[in-house]
Image (cartoon, grey):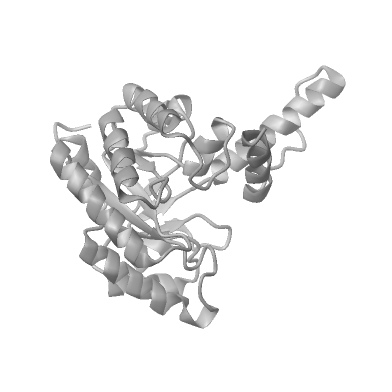
Amino acid sequence: MDMKKPDSTFRDLHKDGLLVLANVTDAGSARIVESLGCKAVATSSAAVAWSHGYPDGNTLPLELLSNTVRSMARVLTVPLTVDIEGGYSHDLNNVSHVINSVIKAGAVGINLEDGSESPDLLCQKIEVARSVANQLGVDLFINARTDIYLKALVPVGERLEETVRRASLYSEAGADGVFAAGMVEANDIEALCQSTRLPVNVLFRENLPDQGELERLGVKRLSAGSSIAELLYGANAAIAKNFLQTGCLTTQSLNAYTYQELNSMMAGASTT
């Protein structure tokens, strides 16, 4: 990495070309991804939560999150961005505490999502994040995720318009990027990219256009999300099952878990 501060380096990665992020779970996977030549490392909130036996969905204790971020930052030389879901709270003071903790642990970027809550609430969280970052002297890259497509929050015919509207709101609130999770249609992606000054981030899906097409459409960031973790946990289960049955290690018949299967499994563990 060059002599720029990590925060300015990460910001610059959104200016030219397509930033591809193979989202990680822990310090080991972060180090592996960096060794493959990635220019930045991003967490998956779901993968981090699952690694501690918690479901995705604002349930991970802050101490575990902060320790995970700190362990990643210790082994990395490239910028680290952290998915903090909805800030793990709707109380702005709590959100401020979370953001303060992850920045001090080593993050120079965050994802903040709206989920099914009002976009006005996410605007407030973005403003809080900027205030905290400024106090700490970090040029934090705030990636505002909207779940309009991912969670089907409005009827199909209204999704693009509502995503564009929210991108504008989040931009005015101080966001640096917009993450249209679940958007896969090329026409929608291109329309969003043309409608906003913010770098557009999309989430891997089987029917998403390829990297070259995404770059042509104007996308600046592609995230794997929890897909890598889903595959790895599925492989773990298949290999372990075969070993328990036969005493042998084999890589045959490996299948990914689904997001829903892993989240349900961890939800049951975290309540016992």
Residue 261 in view = yes
Number of dots carrying numbers: 0
Q: Position of residue 259 (x, y in %)?
A: 62, 48
Furthest residue toward bottom: 157
Q: Position of residue 248 (x, y in %)?
A: 80, 19
Residue at 73%, 28% in the rendered image: 239
- Residue 41, compared with residue 210, is above or below; it is above
Furthest residue toward right: 245
- Residue 7, compared with residue 122, is above or below; it is above
Q: Position of residue 222 (x, y in %)?
A: 41, 53
Q: In the picture, which quadrant includes the N terminus?
A: top left
Q: Position of residue 241 (x, y in %)?
A: 79, 28
Residue at 44%, 63% in the rendered image: 117
Q: Answer with the quarter of the image where residue 88 lies.
A: top left
Q: Answer with the quarter of the image where residue 54 lies.
A: top right
Residue 39 in view = no
Side of 120 where 28 appears, left or right: right
Furthest residue toward top: 247
Q: In the picture, which quadrant includes the C terminus?
A: top right
- Residue 71, compared with residue 146, is above or below; it is above
128 or 231: nearer the viewer: 128
185 or 237: nearer the viewer: 237
- Residue 240, compared with residue 220, is above or below; it is above
Residue at 71%, 42% in the rendered image: 255
